[in-house]
Amino acid sequence: MKKEDKVLNIEKLETLLNEYAHFYVTDIAGLNAEATSSLRRKSFGKEVKLVMVKNKLFCKALERKGIDYSQIESAFHGTSAIMFSNTGNVPAKLIKEVNGPKDQIVKLKAAYVEECFYGADSLDVLVAVKSKNELIADVIALLQSPAKNVISALQSGANTIHGVLKTLGERPE
């Protein structure tokens, strides 16, 4: 590969790193052409960008971005495909979905999620990581819960009082 091509590839990878907040380093060498196409379609449907990279060029892009990847440096060997996403747990769920309960076709090498690095054995943890929007929804639900309880109690009390008054009003004197 010519030096100009390498520079262009590094710039493209750097652009992707700026565009997406999270990335997963995976090994999809075990997939045939049909399975790879299927994975790309599923990735596209879930707003995950799947890119095959040269390890050294991706490391250069990480350096230019200012990300210290020393914790996951061992992941950059062999064939690597990077899954870029703006939601931290979507690629992990996609990997779980593609692999199924028994197989491990798509292998997780490392991940960079919520500004933290995760190793190859962290797939289950990454599936459970909640996105920012999910956490906000949980906080809102917790904040709304007491108000809903008060309103429910007031409404049930009003129905009870209404029933008592109606019964008393209908009672012959």
Image (cartoon, rainbow, N blue to C red):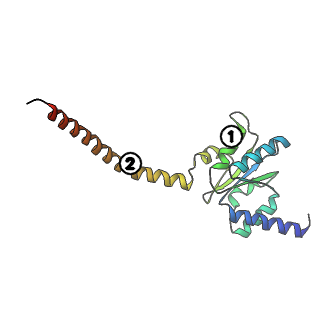
Q: Nearer the viewer, residue 137 or 59?
A: 137
Quarter of the image for residue 86 reads: bottom right
Q: Which residue carries the number 1 mark?
A: 97
User: Which residue is found at the position 68% from the left and 41% from the top?
Assistant: 96
Exactly how many numbered labels are in the figure? 2
Q: Nearer the viewer, residue 33 or 125?
A: 33
Is 120 left, or right, of 58 in this rendering?
Answer: left
Marks 2, 1: nearer the viewer: 2
Residue furthest to the right: 2
Task: Report crowding for label 2: few under 14, some 14 to 19, many 20 or more residues within 10 A (C-alpha).
Answer: few
Residue 32 visible within the image:
no
Q: Position of residue 168 (x, y in %)?
A: 15, 34
Q: Position of residue 68 (x, y in %)?
A: 68, 64
User: Which residue is found at the position 72% from the left and 39% from the top?
Assistant: 99
Q: Which disc, if any, is residue 145?
A: 2
Label 1: element kind: helix
User: Type of residue at label 1?
Assistant: Glu
Task: Report crowding for label 1: few under 14, some 14 to 19, many 20 or more residues within 10 A (C-alpha).
Answer: few
